[in-house]
Every structure is written in structure tokens, then in C-alpha cells.
Image (cartoon, rainbow, N blue to C red):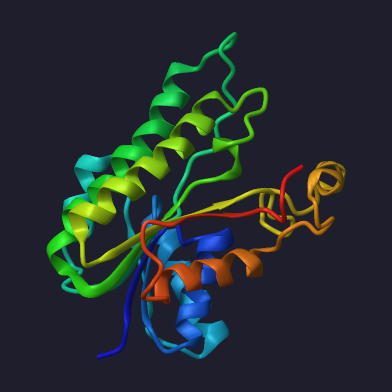
Amino acid sequence: MSKQVLIVGGTSGIGRELAAAYARQGASVIVAGRDGARAERTAEEINSETDAGHVRGIAADLAKPESLEPSLSGIEHVDAIVLAGMRRDNNTIAGYDIAGATELAIAKVVGYTTVVHTLRSRISPTGSVLLFGGLAKDVPYPGSTTITTVNAGVTGLVATLAKELAPVRVNAIHPGMVGDSPYWAGNQPAVEVARARILTGVVPTMRDIVEGSLFLLENPAANGVNLDLNGGHA
């Protein structure tokens, strides 16, 4: 049986690129996103691009954790779970948006945990889970109040899930700016500001983050790791 991979937040950006990478390797990939129709379209696109034919899309909304069990009920077995879904949230203390903060916190803390809880008995003993955090956990900026908090929370999730799910491995990847991602591509002024703060002077790409993700998902010695991938932040 081919490797079974679930990518929640796989309809765009890094999640989509990771889904395509696994499809090229011959894995059976499930792409999940808030919009089921978009997830199905993304799966069809990846199948076309990779000549794979074994990628499918489903709806799964991390911000509605009570809906995740029925959404994931069709998954009988999984070898790798990637939790890449997130919400953008520009939220200062002075102008605190409770609704936005709540949605982000639920999606990335409760939602991530609920996916793992729901599938815990269906994960291969040699399988792995990868959570997505981010540089904001260590480098806050104006408006990052909630993002910094939840990304720091991801490190706590790695610690507890690695113990509770053993022998299943659990890791997290924490990218900084990813220059060719849909969010940043085309915003060259912001990319250049980031480049000036990166010790290598090279802004990471989606391919860089995909390669780091594959390492954490596939290397049997990688467990309980929070991997920062940002080129070194000055």
C-alpha cells in the first residue's frame, strides 16, 4: 500500500507544494481545506501537474473543530499528517480584534490538536505529524500579538504530542518570510526589508520549506524538533 498523507491547509502555498512533492513520490495524498470545492479543484490540478491520479480533496475547517471528526471520517489509515492551515491576523493590543484572535487561536491550537485526536488510532506506528508554526514566535512585530502567541504554542504542542503519540513522531517547522509564497510574492519592498535582516541574504523559497518538511516527516530520528527555517535572522 502506498504512503497515505493528509495535508490540512494544502490548497495553496507551501501546503500545496508539499502535496505535489508527495504526489510525485507516488504517495496517496488528501488535500484538506475550509472550502471543499477548492480542495477538490486543487487535487485535480496536482493530479494533472504530476500525472499522479492519487490526490483527492476534502473539506476540513480547523476553526470549527467540532466539524473535524465527520470531515475526517473517510480516512481509514494515514502515515503522515501535515497541519499547515492558518489564518492571517494583524492584531495589536491597542486595536484588539477579539473575533479574529479567537478564530486564529482555535484554528491553530484547538484545530490542530483535534485533527490529531480524531486520527490518533489511524496513524501508522512508524508515521509522523508535522505542525506549522512561524518565526513570529521568536520575533514579534506590531500586530503579531496573537500570531506570536499561537506559534509559541505550537512548540508546546510538539512537546506534549510527541510524548502522547509515541512511537509516532511529532515535529514542527517554523518558516520566516517565504519570498515566493502567494502571500509575499509581488511585495518586493517587504521582501527586500526581510532580506536585509537575513544573515545569508537569501530569502527562503517554498521549495526550501518543502524540503525541510520532508526531512522532518521522513527522517526516523527527527522527533520533538522545532525547526526554524529562515536563513538566520539578525
Residue sitting at x 35%, y 50%: 158
**Percent of width and height locating residue 175:** 60, 52
Residue sitting at x 81%, y 43%: 197
Instruction: Give above or below for 192 relative to 80.
Output: above
Q: Residue furthest front?
A: 221
| Res. 36 image quadrant | bottom left
Please tell me which residue lies in front, 26 or 40.
26
Residue sitting at x 55%, y 45%: 134
Q: Residue furthest top?
A: 94
| Res. 125 image quadrant | bottom left
The reply, left or right, for residue 2 in relation to residue 233 is left
User: Residue 61: in sight, yes or no?
Assistant: no
User: Residue 222: in sight, yes or no?
Assistant: yes
Instruction: Give above or below for 22 relative to 70.
Output: below
The reply, left or right, for residue 49 in relation to residue 132 is right
Please tell me which residue lies in front, 164 or 151.
164
The reply, left or right, for residue 66 in relation to residue 189 is left
Residue sitting at x 21%, y 67%: 167
Rendered-image quadrant of the N terminus: bottom left
**Percent of width and height locating residue 122:** 16, 68
**Percent of width and height locating residue 191:** 81, 47
Rendered-image quadrant of the C terminus: top right
**Percent of width and height locating residue 86:** 47, 44
The reply, left or right, for residue 104 in relation to residue 176 is left
Instruction: Give above or below for 144 relative to 230.
Output: above
Tag count in the figure? 0
